[in-house]
Image: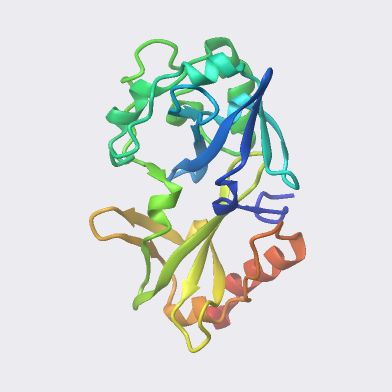
Amino acid sequence: MTVESAGARSVRTLSGYAIAAMDGDIGRVRDAYFHDRYWVIRYVVVETSHWPTGRRVLISPCSLCGAEHERGILRATLTKCQIATSPDVDTEKPVSRQHEIERYLYYLPSYWSATAGSRYAMAGVPAATLGLEAEGDPHGHDDPHLRSAHAVMRHYVHAVDGDIGRVADFLYDDHSWRITHVVVATRTFRPGRKVLVPVRWVSGVSWNAGTVDVSLTGESIRRAPDYEGPWLVDRDYLDRVAAHYTSPLSF
């Protein structure tokens, strides 16, 4: 079974999830950072509001061991102290400037080399791209492809024949943490209508232009099956979306 044929969840709804450390709750998720070439979530941004200093830190999904989606909880393999004493994330800096982000990473070398590598390998993501082999200089793998999910959710979706709408959300697989689809709020006669575009059709993300460029016509996106999320999206619906974009009638 491919990632896109499995169930998928909303990235937007991760915001507000509680982080359960090994010794108690430590804070809540405020954003997710993803790699826009390999489409995998690299970090969740956690606000440690239950700590006296109240800070925002980065946690890799490799340090998360499970989720209780009904209760809005992500469970971590770190202690509250490990999370809360990680360096602050300067959330005012654009996340595309990876050299401003990498210095904040919390490294757990033995865990990165074993569990992290195997989890991302299942998603087809090269370890070198994610910096998994780096146990020394955190500046050695500057990456201009790291994006804030919340920031990109404000971008226009630019089809080959013009703007079609805005990014409303992303869907991700909560086992591999790979982003599978862009949720597009289309400009149609039906206000609030949303559809999915598989990320394989995304040709680029531009901070300067504020766009997510897709290699599809506006009409093919408008004809896609309606998206009714943000709950768990089932396989049957994702199969219908995949069939739509592989049909000659979509182009």
**Which residue extends farthest left?**
208
**Which residue extends farthest bottom?**
189
Task: Judge left or right: residue 1 versus residue 54.
Answer: right
**Corner quadrant of residue 104:** top left
Judge whether residue 191 can be spotted in this image: yes
Task: Judge left or right: residue 86 versus residue 249.
Answer: left
**Which residue extends farthest front?**
52
Residue depicted at x 54% and y 53%: 12
Residue 203 image position (x, y, % from top left): 39, 58
Image position of 71 with respect to 82: above or below: below
Image position of 218 with respect to 182: above or below: below
Query: What scheme was used to colour the molecule?
Result: rainbow
Considering depth in this image, is 19 or 185 the residue closer to the camera?
A: 19
Judge whether residue 251 can be spotted in this image: no
Residue depicted at x 33% and y 62%: 211
Residue depicted at x 59% and y 18%: 80
Residue 185 image position (x, y, % from top left): 49, 71
Task: Judge left or right: residue 78 versus residue 137.
Answer: right
Considering depth in this image, is 70 or 153 the residue closer to the camera?
A: 70
Residue 54 image position (x, y, % from top left): 45, 27
Labels in figure, total: 0
Considering depth in this image, is 51 or 69 the residue closer to the camera?
A: 51
Residue depicted at x 63% and y 36%: 18
